[in-house]
Amino acid sequence: MKTTTALVLSMLLLMGCVDDQAGAPKASAAPAAGTEMTSAQSPAEEAIAAADDTMFVEYVWHKEGENFSQEALLEKVLYWNQLIDAGEYEISRANILFPREATENYDFVWVMVWPSVAARNAGWAYWAANDEAAWLQDVEGVFSFDPANAYLFASAIQRQPTLPAATRVFENQFNFCTFNEGQGPAQLAAYQAAHVDFIQGYEASGGPSGYWYTMLEPTFEPAAQRPDFVWLDLWSSAEEKADGMEYFSASELAAAADAMATCNRVGFAGLNIRS
């Protein structure tokens, strides 16, 4: 895999034409098992769409091509933003995620945040009718994606950062979790309440932070076992993540998390490309 954290940082430096202040994040999330990009809503989508204060985060897996480079990717990012500005899209935020551990499934993930399932479906329909052909021609040889590898999650933010983001670079970690025997939603609610006190203690000693988290709900049926919950942690930098994880690992809360659920954890370096 050619994409590294150095690529993320150098892309940030190259994006001189973009405002350095990313602002407080709206949402983000992670890939899982597949769904088709269609305008039809599943029963799960319809149920989630009825909820208040819910954002929808879509993750599209991408593979690098033989002509991939950080400069080429940045060029396509700028072109994509021009298409979104000129078209009929309601995309409130977009990121690119670079996996911290190599995987055969993708080299990077293009993330789009939508205000609703209807906006997502309308956006993809407009894309197919107006921009898709030109985009595929422009990115040929640089990167590619399979429409089947696009995954839409409902996102409910549980905590906002207390320190505004200073750059467009960030870190995140997806926790795909299954309850251990005898554990369930009541234990998760109690854990979240304890997590509030834990973060307050962490910031009392270290000051405000860019840490925040959201809970994700797939709008599709995963090919593998469906997790009981998906918890997404986000930090403003790799250093902040390392410090926070070290503080967490030495706490009673870490033991409580292990007792409550078994989780598959997947980390990414992120770059905000639209906000």
Image: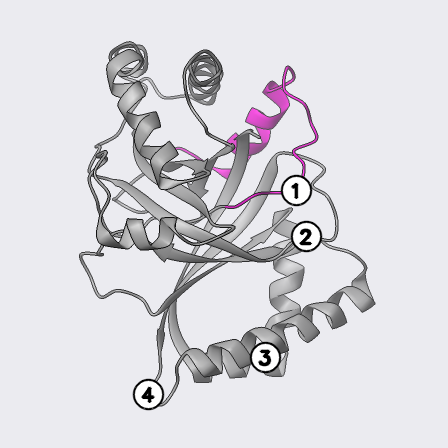
* Disc 2: which residue: 161
Q: Nearer the viewer, residue 7 or 221?
A: 221
Q: Mark 2 Cα within 10 Å, few/some/many (few <14, many 20+)?
A: some
Q: Name the residue rendered at 74%, 53% in the picture.
A: 162
Q: Nearer the viewer, residue 41 or 155?
A: 41
Point out the stretch of residues depicted in magenta. 1-27
> In this rendering, would 90 be left or right of 182?
right
> Closer to the camera: disc 3 or disc 1?
1
Mark 1 to mark 2 CA distance (whole Å):
7 Å
Residue 147 falls left or right of residue 100: left
Measured from the top left, where is residue 268 in percent x and y?
47, 47
Q: Amino acid at mark 1?
A: Ala
The answer to whether the residue labelled 4 contacts the one labelled 1, judged by CB atoms less than 8 Å apart, is no
The disc at residue 253 is 3
Determine whether the residue tagged by mark 3 lies in a helix, strand or loop: helix
Q: Is residue 7 magenta?
A: yes
* Residue 274 horizontal/vertical position (percent): 54, 27
Q: How is the image coloured?
A: one colour
Residue placed under numbered mark 4 in the picture = 181
